[in-house]
Image (spheres, rainbow, N blue to C red):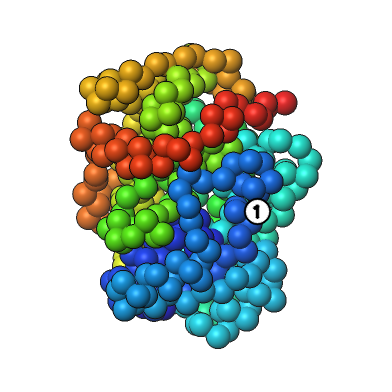
Amino acid sequence: MRVLILGGDGYLGWPTAMAFAAKGHDVMVLDSYLRRTIAMETNSEALTPNPNLGARASVFEQLTGKKIEVVIGDCADYRTMTTVFSQFKPEAVIHYAEQPSAPYSMMNFDTAHVTLNNNLNATFNTIFAVMEHTPECHIIKLGTMGEYGTPNIDIEEGWLEIEHKGRKDKFLYPRQAGSLYHTTKVLDTDMLWFYVRAYGIRVTDLMQGPVYGLSTTEADMDERLIPNFHYDDIFGTVMNRFLTQAVAGIPLTVYGKGGQTRGYLNITDTLKCVDLAMNNPAESGQLRILNQFTEVFSVNELAEKVKRVGDHMGLNVQVKSIDNPRKEREEHRYVAHSTGLMELGLKPHLMTDEVVAGMLNKIMKYKDRIDPAKVMPRVLWP
């Protein structure tokens, strides 16, 4: 298939590009380096040394004989998008091209504006480029479980059937985002749903939980192909932060009471989920929503897991509760359902002690690159 990956330089975008190219798909990546720019501006550079897209694509081609076409351009600019879509004619578009940090979106007006402008325009432009140039193209959009918030009822897979005054109907599950970033993802879903209803486009919206890990089949071939692994307070997911802190001898920073509970998944499973969604496309006029996670943990449970494994490896891991910089519930009910991807064939890679030890060993190779100044919270929710 001809697969266009928007945000192809990202933590998930680049591994997806390699995985799909390795399977024989015709892959093009489009990226503006927005995340790299923001990371430099906020002193939040990745742990791993990551060449630019052109260099990485060249290394990948030398090792595999498979080509990944690279375009540097802004998905929030429609002229760029219409040129790419008209020339490449993708059969599937994987949309990762969004500013992905909740803390960054909450820093100030400027960072909020960047987040809002980039995320909504990238999605809007994707929709219109598909309608104008490739109306049968399947849009696979990376959403987030954070759209749902932490309601006191079960989180269903995207939709909720409601009975009111004797009548029933089916609606998008109510959203209650906890940051501007997550709010843009809610707006993405609403916008996609409108254009599905109005124009009959085909969309899969993947409500993904936090991802951990830096190892994939293709990335393990050469360290220059490793994903952009962040451990800082702005771009690093909690598990990746804890793993890096353990290696560096920095106490694991548990925000508040540590009862914040979410659904997590290994980066390997992210690639599989996107692959399953692409090879089992949504129908025309369908917004298919799949909750994308494999296990549920609280922050305290993650810290305990990293400490147990790290101590066994001689790292003497400490855990420290600190004031929570975010406005969020620190103790809450969290029952989320996810069956769609399992039915499509997902076989999860669980967070075993062996998996945690493997990640710690990999991070140890880059221990001298860890900057303790990037770990503590630098952004306070207003």
Residue 163 % position (x, y): 47, 37
> Which image quarter is the C terminus in?
top right
Residue 234: in sight, yes or no? Answer: yes
Residue 337 located left or right of residue 381: left
The residue that disc 1 covers is 37
Residue 153: in sight, yes or no? Answer: no
Report the residue that reaches farthest toward the front: 368
- The residue nearer to you, when weighing 65 against 287, is 65
Q: Is residue 282 above or below residue 295?
A: below
Which amino acid is tagged 1?
Thr
Residue 15 located left or right of residue 311: right
Q: Is residue 253 above or below residue 64?
A: above
> Which image quarter is the N terminus in?
bottom left
Q: Residue at x 31, y 68 (%)?
A: 279
Q: Looking at the rendering, which quadrant does residue 120 occupy?
A: bottom right
Q: Secondary structure at mark 1?
A: helix
Residue 336 % position (x, y): 37, 34
Residue 180 % position (x, y): 66, 40
- The residue nearer to you, when weighing 360 against 118, is 360
Q: Residue at x 66, y 30 (%)?
A: 379
Report the residue that reaches farthest toward the right: 109
Q: Looking at the rendering, which quadrant does residue 335 occupy?
A: top left
